[in-house]
């Protein structure tokens, strides 16, 4: 049996088509009649998609002769837009190890989140709408992943952004949710600007190259990934004349592509939308803002890695931004009180890891590429699990503030166990999945000649263990610190089951030889455990756990017990705050004040402020335009004459210049 | 005095007259006088057409255009009563904008003019244009203008029908708009 | 063959029929005049699609059809059909008093005369026909704007008239210069003989300026906001769609047919104008609270995008402009139709009239949202494909700065389009807001515009066909 | 300027000098007149200047045919249509506002309530 005989490989387009059909069916036909059916149809379609994608992965991998690389297939392709020959835009399904991997991740997590949402969103006013948009999102994300060219990727990229916009703002009666959805849309759209301009820039540069190549280009189009990845094309692109500030179209295009990717993947300084995006329903946070959509930027850079590698300094930018984001977000995560916000900053930090891994390819060794995709794969499962766990806590205790939680391990034993497993996984404890993928990233940094980056990465690993242990301890250990928390109950089975499935995946995903499958030619393939990396990371993670345990496990519980016995809650709170003074001194004074606070200040004053400033400027300029509307007929006539004078002057000036 | 000199002299006489009347059109405080001055300008233009050799055009100019201005005058008197016939001096600001725009336009035209080689009228074709223009208007071939002729009739019809519909005497304010068309 | 002018003739015949019929019917009958006019326009549309070849000549070449002209006429007829549809409730005096239209047959007749003039623009092959077609496409608009005969409309119409008459005088003077420089009124001969002297810049500048008024190029756009709000809503829709289409057709005639050989000379000027126009339009729209003013400024910025495609006078550019024009007409028609329906229900043009629309009229809100997203250029709607094509024309012409400006502008535009979406989907519904059902014809227009906006973006056939047409364009 | 005048009594430059001056005066009036009727008069001045310009170019630059003269003729018709449209608007405005002073018309759609007063 060959690929040509495999039904699912030949018809992989069915996988995204199912959620799209379901979106149309649920949105237009089912929703008005039955909300219950809306959820069922939506979940069933995605579950079917997930089953098909596992079949696809099975069929695709089955033929891998172990030493040889897996092939890149384009089983289905249709012409969409034709500018001219060589600049044709197709729609199609590109199957290679990376896209098959992502298809499996997206459909699996999406199916589990759909299932989880059936109970979680029960009774919400927009139940049908929610599932319709979740379907739309799944379709768009799959279209993005399977895109054989930059334009299809961009179109789906925008659709993904639009569905994210609707889902963040799902509770449109909450002003914070509305503000967050708008912020997310505007910030990512701003970044997408770079993507769009990059497409135009690269498209024309590559088109010129294609014209030079002539028949050698075959049927490949200028914006196809297959074309952009060819070494002769890359060499020609790199040798083009600079277009702006000494940069070639290739370099500029890559930097702009990275701008798009950084927006979607919430890299500093475009990260500001992601923490706010937690205003959306928690399953949405799990699916879109942890497991799938936010990794689109990583996926884009990974896809375009040959371009980045050929461009001067582009990967160094990726490396720096990734490393900084990893550290910066981990530091902030230590100071947050809201469970979901901690997880959001944790996501930022992990995305920073992935970008960092891609950035280490700048030395010419593409090992970081497979490490990034491996971490993307494992992170999707344990982070989705963490979010779903947080969702179960929210569902039970109606609050996400860790200082209002506590002691949940007794009423919610299953959730507790699963959350603990995910915490250990993200902290990188053997044999859970995070251990393997994080070590590969750090190994890539160490062996790729970036000792400083390796050190920072190690520090981030410690911080990760610390903040995860902190929220875990505060949430599940000690005593309930709120009435509502005390009456918490275990989540229903439809919520626990998907979490259980994710837990299995989070536990075993590390043994899947992902990095061997997705390795680019020339990448060093690690087998076994790299002790030079594994030992320090494990030690650092244990130190992080110990610090958190010392801060949040012992004294906190004792003080709560003492407060209950003595009835002197106020003093007990003070006592707890005394412990917190240490924490405050360590975190707020050292980490927060020295690192996080300036960053937060920068974030508030410059990043947020500049966004705000842009808004004010725009409105001022708008008022200026408005001021021209004096209402005087003759003022309008004078403007018209000015316009004519302007045209005459421009024509004359252009003729002079030309 | 040769015919050429005579034509030149006539041109300058009418040019001077035309420009001074035009000055009155835009500057005279009394609108009625401005309108009469416009009639004069249009009359001068008829003379220009004649000097250029387009006698038919000159006739049309006087019959239709100048006649049209009489209609304008009648409307004007009906419309704005005696009080509004007086125009204020423009405020200094408006005056400045007007002068800048007008002088600017004039200077740009001079600049364009300077790039154009001068030429003189080749010779009088007075009276010979009537037949040529008439033929051009009714010719349905590649040299003819029957299509714009039809277009202009559509334009005039639309302007007349619409103008009457918009301006017909109905006290809209006294009726709800939905019933306004009954009046 | 006379079938070549069949759409124009059908439109004129319908206009005359409506005008005469108006004399003999009572008020009930008068309400039926609008469907009759609609049948005439749809008939012309069918005739265009089914009978009219996309190239040919009449009157010895004085009236010509060319492949892109065919598409311009299609856009114009679609706009006319759409505007007549969305005018139906206003015409029948339904809805709030504020939103009704004094239903005289003259209104329809003048609209159709106006349409006939617009249809003639892309077929003109000499300056005389071109000028008269443009005047016929412009002058009736002054009257239509004042059609409600209230103070607001009259004031708006007067300002429109003053600026418009000045623009047309400047255009005429520019045509005079072109005539003087080339010694001919034939547009093709003009192109062959056009020199590159200062007089030619003046002439082209005057002509472009005169047309810029119609296309609301900054800073010749200042009339637009007040005219859009002062005019009856169907007329505002007419201005925002058909009038724009005619202006683009005229600009294509001038830039490609007359000044095409000198594209290198005018491309920087057009590029700067495009950048200025889209920026001014967007900045103006950001601060508006009135939907029609917002749509007016949005239309200004859209004109800027359209102008981007004209840079360089390439065939790809012509294809992109034509395609985006069709998309723009359909999409904007959707936005205006939704605004018209809301205006009928509430009598208000304010943004707040859209409050909670998604709960009162989910389909209407969906249509409006898709139209706005189309205008903002969100994939996979036609607005995205069109903008992508336009921007890539600029990239092809090496105008990278213009691409950047256009991309930034299309992002800024999202901000104010989202303001309407926010009102519809996020603000709580007004308890007092009426639950009037959407009338039949506006509903049809909305449905067609919404589906059209999606289909144009997703189905490649349209762009492919336009591109093939552009390749055969002389 | 001086050589333009010396270039020949009724040469092309002299003719165009006059038409440009007429058009410029029309622009001045258009921008300064307060009465809408005065604006209309100024517009007629502009159109007339353009029509004369066509005739001038016809006689001096393209004397073989009568294209310019035909255009001038059409301009007369267009000017007539413009007068009709303008007057209709003025009559309407006067019946609504009791004035045709354009400086008193300063609304810019902000009073968008629409409808009759």
Image (spheres, coloured by chain):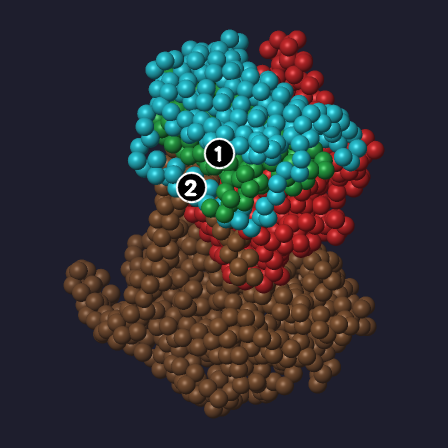
Chain colours: A brown, B cyan, C red, D green
Chain identity of mark 2: B
Quarter of image, res C57? top right
Q: Quadrant of the N terminus of chain A?
A: bottom right
Vertical placement of residue C211 versus C156, above or below: below
- The residue depicted at 57 percent of the width and 26 percent of the height is B47
Chain identity of mark 1: D
- Asked if marks 1 and 2 fall on the same chain, the answer is no
Q: Position of residue A378 (x, y in %)?
A: 54, 72
Quarter of image, res C234? top right
- The residue depicted at 29 percent of the width and 60 percent of the height is A481
The residue positioned farthest toward the bottom in the image shown: A532
Q: Which mark is residue D101?
A: none
The residue positioned farthest toward the front in the image shown: B1
Q: Position of residue A91 (x, y in %)?
A: 69, 59
- The residue depicted at 60 percent of the width and 78 percent of the height is A238
Kindly identify which residue carries mark 1. Answer: D22
- The residue depicted at 50 percent of the width and 29 percent of the height is B13
The residue carrying pointer 1 sits among few (fewer than 14), some (14 to 19) or many (20 or more) residues within 10 Å by Cα, namely many
Kindly identify which residue carries mark 2. Answer: B103
Residue A160 in view here? no
Label 2: state its secondary structure. helix
Label 1: state its secondary structure. helix
Mark 1–mark 2 CB contact (< 8 Å): no
Q: For this rendering, which residue is in front, B176 or C52?
A: C52
Residue A209 in view here? yes
Q: For this rendering, which residue is in front, A77 or C291?
A: C291
Q: Quadrant of the C terminus of chain A?
A: bottom right
Q: Position of residue A18 (x, y in %)?
A: 67, 54
Vertical placement of residue D3 versus B143, above or below: below
Q: For this rendering, which residue is in front, A195 or D46?
A: D46
Q: Position of residue C148 (x, y in %)?
A: 49, 21
Cα separation, mark 1 vs mark 2, equals 11 Å
């Amino acid at each position: 049996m060959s690929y040509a005989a495999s039904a699912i490989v030949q018809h992989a387009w069915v996988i995204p088509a199912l959620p799209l059909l379901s979106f149309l069916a649920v949105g237009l036909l089912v929703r008005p009649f039955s909300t219950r059916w809306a959820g069922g149809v939506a979940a069933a379609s995605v579950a079917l998609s997930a089953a098909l994608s596992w079949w696809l992965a099975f069929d695709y991998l089955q033929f891998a002769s172990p030493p040889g690389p897996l092939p890149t297939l384009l089983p289905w392709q249709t012409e969409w837009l034709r500018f001219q020959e060589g600049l044709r835009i197709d729609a199609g399904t590109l199957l290679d190890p990376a896209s098959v991997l992502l298809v499996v991740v997206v459909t699996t997590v999406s199916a589990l989140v759909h299932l989880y949402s059936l109970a979680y969103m029960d009774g919400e006013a927009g139940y049908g709408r929610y599932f319709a948009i979740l379907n739309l999102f799944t379709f768009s994300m799959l279209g993005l992943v399977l895109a054989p060219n930059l334009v299809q990727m961009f179109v789906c990229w925008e659709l993904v952004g639009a569905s994210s916009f609707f889902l963040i703002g799902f509770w449109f009666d909450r002003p914070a949710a509305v503000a967050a959805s708008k912020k997310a849309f505007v910030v990512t759209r701003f970044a997408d600007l770079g993507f769009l301009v990059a497409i135009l820039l690269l498209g024309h540069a590559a088109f010129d190259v294609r014209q030079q190549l002539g028949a050698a280009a075959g049927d490949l189009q200028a914006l196809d990934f297959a074309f952009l990845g060819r070494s002769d094309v890359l060499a020609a692109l790199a040798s083009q004349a600079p277009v702006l500030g000494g940069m070639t179209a290739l370099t500029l295009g890559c930097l702009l592509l990275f701008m798009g990717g950084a927006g979607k993947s919430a890299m500093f300084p475009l990260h500001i939308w992601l923490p706010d995006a937690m205003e959306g329903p928690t399953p949405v946070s799990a699916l879109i803002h942890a497991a799938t959509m936010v990794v689109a930027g990583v996926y884009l850079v990974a896809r375009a890695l040959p371009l980045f590698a050929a461009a001067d300094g582009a990967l160094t930018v990726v490396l720096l931004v990734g490393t900084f984001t990893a550290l910066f977000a981990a530091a902030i995560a230590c100071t947050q009180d809201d469970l979901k916000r901690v997880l959001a900053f944790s996501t930022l930090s992990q995305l920073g890891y992935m970008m960092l891994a891609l950035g280490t390819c700048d030395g010419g060794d593409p090992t970081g590429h497979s490490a990034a995709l491996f971490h993307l794969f494992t992170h999707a499962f344990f982070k989705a699990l963490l979010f779903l766990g947080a969702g179960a806590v929210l569902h039970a205790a109606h609050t996400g503030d860790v200082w209002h939680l506590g002691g949940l391990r007794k009423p919610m034993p299953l959730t507790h166990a699963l959350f603990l497993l995910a915490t250990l996984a993200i902290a990188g404890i053997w044999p859970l999945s995070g251990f393997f993928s994080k070590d590969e990233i750090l190994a890539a940094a160490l062996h790729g000649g970036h000792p400083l980056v390796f050190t920072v990465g190690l520090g981030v690993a410690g911080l990760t263990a610390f903040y995860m242990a902190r929220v875990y301890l505060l949430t599940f250990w000690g005593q309930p610190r709120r009435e509502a928390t005390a009456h918490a109950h275990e989540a229903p089975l439809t919520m626990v089951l998907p979490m259980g499935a994710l837990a299995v995946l989070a536990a075993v995903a590390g043994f899947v030889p992902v990095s061997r499958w997705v390795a680019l030619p020339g990448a060093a393939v690690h087998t076994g455990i790299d002790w030079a990396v594994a030992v320090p990371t494990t030690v650092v993670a244990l130190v992080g756990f110990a610090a958190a345990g010392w801060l949040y496990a012992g004294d906190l519980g004792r003080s709560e017990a003492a407060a209950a016995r003595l009835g002197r809650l106020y003093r007990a709170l003070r006592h707890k705050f005394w412990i917190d003074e240490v924490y405050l001194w360590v975190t707020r004074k050292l980490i927060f004040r020295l690192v996080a606070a300036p960053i937060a200040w920068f974030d508030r004053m410059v990043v947020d402020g500049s966004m705000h400033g842009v808004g004010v400027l725009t409105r001022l300029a708008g008022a200026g335009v408005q001021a021209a509307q004096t209402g005087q007929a003759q003022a309008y006539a004078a403007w018209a004459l000015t316009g004519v004078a302007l045209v005459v002057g421009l024509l004359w000036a252009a003729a002079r210049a030309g | 005095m040769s015919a050429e000199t005579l034509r030149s002299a006539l041109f300058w006489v009418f040019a001077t007259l035309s420009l001074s009347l035009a000055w009155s059109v835009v500057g005279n405080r009394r609108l009625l006088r401005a309108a009469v001055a416009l009639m004069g300008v249009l009359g001068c233009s008829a003379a220009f057409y004649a000097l250029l050799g387009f006698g038919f055009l000159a006739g049309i100019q006087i019959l239709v255009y100048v006649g049209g201005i009489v209609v304008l005058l009648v409307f004007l008197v009906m419309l704005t009563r005696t009080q509004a016939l007086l125009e204020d001096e423009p405020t200094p600001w408006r005056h400045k904008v007007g002068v800048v725009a007008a002088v600017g336009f004039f200077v740009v035209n001079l600049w364009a003019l300077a790039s154009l080689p001068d030429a003189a009228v080749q010779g009088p074709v007075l009276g010979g244009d009537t037949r040529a223009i008439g033929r051009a208007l009714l010719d349905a071939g590649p040299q003819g203008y029957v299509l714009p002729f039809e277009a202009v009739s559509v334009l005039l019809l639309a302007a007349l029908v619409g103008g009457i519909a918009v301006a017909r005497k109905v006290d809209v304010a006294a009726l709800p708009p939905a019933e306004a068309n009954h009046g | 063959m006379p079938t070549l002018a069949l759409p124009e003739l059908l439109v004129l015949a319908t206009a005359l029929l409506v005008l005469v019929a108006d004399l003999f019917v009572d008020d009930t009958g008068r309400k039926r005049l609008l469907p009759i006019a609609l049948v005439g326009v749809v008939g012309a549309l069918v005739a265009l699609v089914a009978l009219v070849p996309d190239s040919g000549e009449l009157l010895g070449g004085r009236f010509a059809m060319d492949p892109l002209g065919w598409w311009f006429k299609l856009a114009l007829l679609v706009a006319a059909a759409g505007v007549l549809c969305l005018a139906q409730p206003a015409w029948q005096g339904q809805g709030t008093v504020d939103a009704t239209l004094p239903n005289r047959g003259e209104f329809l007749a003048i609209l159709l005369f106006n349409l006939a003039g617009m249809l003639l623009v892309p077929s003109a092959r000499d300056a005389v026909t071109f000028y008269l077609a443009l005047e016929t496409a412009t002058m009736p608009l002054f009257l239509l704007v004042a059609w409600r005969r209230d103070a607001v409309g009259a004031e708006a119409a007067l300002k429109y008239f003053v600026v418009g008459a000045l623009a047309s005088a400047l255009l005429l003077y520019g045509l005079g210069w072109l005539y003087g420089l080339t010694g001919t009124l034939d547009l093709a001969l003009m192109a062959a003989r056009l020199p590159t002297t200062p007089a030619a810049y003046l002439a082209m500048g005057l002509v472009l300026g005169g047309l810029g008024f119609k296309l609301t190029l900054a800073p010749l756009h200042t009339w637009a906001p007040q005219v859009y709000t002062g005019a009856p809503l169907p007329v505002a829709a007419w201005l925002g769609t058909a009038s724009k289409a005619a202006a683009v057709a005229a600009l294509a005639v001038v830039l490609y047919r007359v000044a095409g050989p000198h594209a290198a000379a005018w491309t920087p000027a057009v590029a700067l104008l495009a950048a200025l126009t889209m920026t001014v339009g967007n900045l103006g729209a950001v601060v508006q609270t009135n939907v029609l003013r917002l749509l007016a400024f949005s239309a200004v910025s859209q004109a800027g995008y359209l102008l981007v495609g004209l840079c360089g006078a390439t065939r790809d550019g012509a294809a992109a402009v034509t395609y985006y024009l069709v998309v723009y007409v359909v999409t904007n028609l959707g936005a205006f139709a939704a605004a018209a329906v809301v205006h009928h229900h509430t009598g208000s043009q304010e943004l707040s009239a859209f409050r909670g629309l998604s709960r009162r009229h989910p389909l209407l809100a969906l249509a409006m949202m898709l139209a706005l997203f189309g205008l903002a250029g969100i994939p996979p709607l036609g607005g995205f494909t069109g903008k992508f094509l336009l921007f890539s024309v600029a990239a092809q012409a090496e105008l990278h700065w213009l691409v950047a400006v256009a991309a930034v502008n299309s992002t800024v535009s999202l901000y104010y389009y989202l303001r309407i979406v926010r009102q519809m989907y996020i603000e709580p519904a007004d308890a007092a807001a009426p639950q009037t059902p959407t009338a039949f014809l506006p509903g049809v227009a909305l449905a067609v515009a919404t589906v059209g906006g999606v289909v144009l973006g997703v189905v490649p056939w349209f762009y492919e066909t336009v591109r093939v047409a552009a390749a055969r364009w002389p | 300027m001086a050589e333009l005048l010396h270039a020949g009594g009724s040469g092309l430059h002299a003719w165009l000098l006059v038409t440009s001056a007429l058009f410029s005066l029309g622009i001045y009036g258009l921008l300064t007149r307060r009465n809408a009727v005065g604006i209309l008069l100024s517009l007629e001045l502009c159109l007339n200047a353009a029509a004369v310009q066509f005739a001038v170019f016809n006689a001096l630059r393209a004397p073989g045919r009568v294209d310019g003269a035909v255009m001038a003729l059409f301009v007369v018709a267009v000017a007539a249509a413009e007068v009709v449209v303008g007057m209709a608007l003025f009559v309407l405005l006067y019946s609504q506002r009791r004035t045709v002073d354009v400086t008193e018309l300063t609304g810019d759609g902000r009073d968008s309530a629409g409808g009759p007063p």
